[in-house]
Image: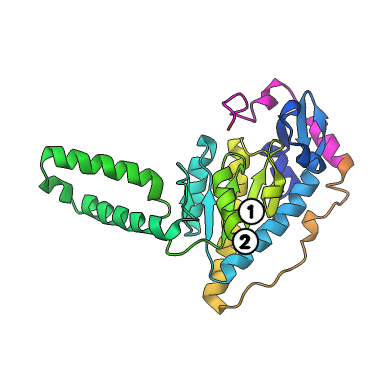
C-alpha cells in the first residue's frame, strides 16, 4: 500500500493554498484555516483522501487497465512525463489536444502517423529528402511530438486520469467526465472539486508538492501492475492504513504546532509559483 505522511506533505508545502480572494467556495470543507492571507489546506483530509485515491489507482492497474497522467503547467511537465514513464503509462504534459478522449478514434490515426514519422526520423530517412522537404518534415515532427509523444502507444481510451490542477486541465477533465472516465486530481483551493471523482486536496503549483503526488500515484499504479502481472487477480479494496488516521502525532493540534514552527513568511507565498500568472 502506497501511503503519504504528514511530515512529507508539510516539507513539500502541500498545505499552502492560494490567496483567500481566489478561493472556490466549494473547497471550504478542505481548508483548515487562513494565515497571512493564504488558505491552509487540511492535511488530515489530504492524507485520508490520498489513501483512497492511491488504492483506487492500484485497483485500476491491477485489473490490467490504463491510467493517463495529465499535467501541462510548466511546474508539472517533467514530473508527469517521468512518473508516467516509470509505471509505463501514457501522459500529456505539453498541451491537451481537444478531443483526445471524445474523438479518440480519429486522433488515433494521427498518433499512427506520428509513430511513422518518428520511425523515419530515427532511421535517418529525413536525410534522403531535399533540404527543403527535410526541414518541413522536421517541423511537422516537432509539432506532432508535443501533442502525441506521451500517448503514441495508447491503444484504447484510458480507464482513469491522474490530473495536476483540474482547473488548468478543465478540457481534459470535461472530456473524461463526459465519457464516464474517473478522474483523480490534486485539487487546490481555487479549483472546483465537484469535477473530480477522487479529490486530493493540496498545493498544485509547488514543484515539490507535484513531484511528491506524481511519484506516489506512479508507485500505486506500479504496485497494481505488478500484482496483475503475477496473479491476474484484481487488488481488493482495503481499509486505509493507520498512518492515515488522525492520531496523537497527526492530530489537528499537532498539525497546528507544525505550522507555527515552520514560521510562515513571505517565502511561503512563493510556494505557488504561478500565483500571479494569467488566470486560466
Quadrant of the rendered image containing residue 14: top right
Task: Depth check: give the residue in front, 279 or 247.
Answer: 279
**Are the two marked residues, 2 and 1, in contact with CB atoms closer than 8 angstroms?**
yes
Q: Which mark is residue 184?
A: 1
Picture layout, residue 126 above or below residue 101: above
Could you say which is closer to the camera, residue 233 or residue 248? Answer: 233
Marks 2/1: CA–CA distance: 8 Å
For numbered disc 1, what is the local secondary structure?
A: strand
**Left or right: 76 as drawn, with respect to 42:** left
2 or 1: mark nearer the eye: 1
Q: Looking at the picture, does residue 52 appear above or below residue 212?
A: below
Which residue is pictured at 29% across the width and 55% down the height?
113
Q: In which quarter of the image is the C terminus?
A: top right
Specify how the rendered protein is coloured. Answer: rainbow
Q: Is residue 89 above or below residue 37?
A: below
Secondary structure found at label 2: helix
The tally of labels here is: 2
Q: Give the range drawn in magenta.
A: 254-279
Measured from the top left, where is residue 193 in percent x and y?
Answer: 71, 46
> Percent x, y for residue 141?
28, 45
> Is residue 273 located in the magenta-colored stretch of the structure?
yes
Give the quarter of the figure containing the N terminus: bottom right
Which of these two is toward me, 156 or 241? 156
The numbered mark, 2 or 1, whose residue comes first in the sequence reads: 2
Please indicate whether residue 107 sits to the left or right of residue 117 in the image.
Answer: right
Where is mark 2, residue-wise? 57
Amino acid at each position: 500500500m502506497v501511503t503519504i505522511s504528514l511530515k512529507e506533505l508539510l516539507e513539500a508545502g502541500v498545505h499552502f493554498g492560494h490567496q483567500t480572494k481566489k478561493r472556490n467556495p466549494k473547497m471550504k470543507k478542505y481548508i483548515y484555516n487562513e494565515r497571512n492571507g493564504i488558505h491552509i489546506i487540511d492535511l488530515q483530509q489530504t492524507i485520508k483522501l490520498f489513501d483512497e485515491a492511491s488504492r483506487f489507482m492500484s485497483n485500476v492497474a491491477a485489473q490490467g487497465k490504463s491510467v493517463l497522467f495529465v499535467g501541462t503547467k510548466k511546474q508539472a511537465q517533467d514530473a508527469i512525463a517521468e512518473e508516467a514513464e516509470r509505471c509505463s503509462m501514457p501522459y500529456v504534459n505539453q498541451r491537451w489536444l481537444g478531443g483526445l478522449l471524445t474523438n479518440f478514434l480519429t486522433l488515433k490515426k494521427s498518433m499512427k502517423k506520428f509513430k511513422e514519422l518518428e520511425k523515419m526520423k530515427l532511421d535517418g530517412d529525413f536525410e534522403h529528402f531535399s533540404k527543403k522537404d527535410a526541414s518541413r518534415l522536421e517541423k511537422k515532427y516537432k509539432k506532432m511530438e508535443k501533442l502525441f509523444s506521451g500517448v503514441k502507444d495508447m491503444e484504447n481510451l484510458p480507464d482513469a486520469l491522474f490530473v495536476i490542477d483540474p482547473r488548468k486541465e478543465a478540457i481534459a477533465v470535461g472530456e473524461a467526465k463526459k465519457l464516464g472516465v474517473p478522474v483523480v486530481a490534486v485539487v487546490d483551493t481555487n479549483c472546483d472539486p465537484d469535477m473530480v471523482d477522487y479529490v486530493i486536496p493540496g498545493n498544485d503549483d509547488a514543484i515539490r508538492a507535484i513531484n511528491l503526488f506524481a511519484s506516489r500515484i506512479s508507485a500505486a499504479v506500479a504496485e497494481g501492475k505488478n500484482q496483475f502481472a503475477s496473479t491476474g487477480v484484481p487488488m481488493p479494496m482495503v481499509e486505509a492504513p493507520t498512518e492515515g488516521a488522525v492520531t496523537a502525532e497527526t492530530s489537528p493540534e499537532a498539525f497546528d504546532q507544525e505550522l507555527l514552527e515552520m514560521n510562515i513568511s513571505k517565502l511561503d507565498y512563493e510556494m505557488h509559483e504561478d500565483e500571479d500568472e494569467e488566470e486560466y
